[in-house]
């Protein structure tokens, strides 16, 4: 059996106004993360399935804001 991965183009088009966010729900392994990474290139990304990130931000939620603001400041300097 060949384990080659097949990518299927989706009709989903997400258009968000500036400074807005949304949730994308769906079953596992259906391409949600792949779609978001491709569609919103350059966006700030937090993978809460990585337990160290999840626990650190759960323990100190203010770190989320600090990291987002720091990332925005770095992008302004570039």
Image: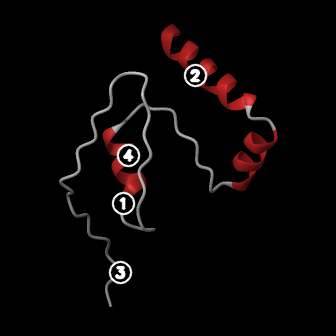
Q: Position of residue 27 (x, y in %)?
A: 42, 68
How much space separates mark 1 and mark 3, taking CA atoms?
17 Å
Residue drawn 57% across the image and 13% down it: 73
Q: Mark 4, residues whose alpha carbon is within 10 Å: few (<14), some, or many (≥20)?
A: some
Nearer to us of marks 1 and 3 is: 1
Any mark on residue 5, and which? none
Q: For mark 3, what is the residue?
A: 3
Q: Is residue 78 visible?
A: no
Q: Position of residue 49 (x, y in %)?
A: 62, 56
Q: Earlier in the sequence, mark 2 or mark 3?
A: 3
Nearest the camera: 41 or 15? 15
Q: For mark 1, what is the residue?
A: 31
Q: Position of residue 67 (x, y in %)?
A: 65, 26
Q: For mark 2, what is the residue?
A: 71
Q: For mark 4, what is the residue?
A: 36
Left or right: residue 72 versus residue 25 is: right
Q: Mark 3, residues whose alpha carbon is within 10 Å: few (<14), some, or many (≥20)?
A: few
In the depicted structure, whether residue 37 falls above or below residue 26:
above
Q: Earlier in the sequence, mark 4 or mark 3?
A: 3
Report helix, strand or loop for mark 4.
helix
Q: Position of residue 30 (x, y in %)?
A: 36, 66
How much space separates mark 2 and mark 3, taking CA atoms?
38 Å
Left or right: residue 36 versus residue 52 is: left
Residue drawn 32% across the image and 31% down it: 16
């Amino acid at each position: 059996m060949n384990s080659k991965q097949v990518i299927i183009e989706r009709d989903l088009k997400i258009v968000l106004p500036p400074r807005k966010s949304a949730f994308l729900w769906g079953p596992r392994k259906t391409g949600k993360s792949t779609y978001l990474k491709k569609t919103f290139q350059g966006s700030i990304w937090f993978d809460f399935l990585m337990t160290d990130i999840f626990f650190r931000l759960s323990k100190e939620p203010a770190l989320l804001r600090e990291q987002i603001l720091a990332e925005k400041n770095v992008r302004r300097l570039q």
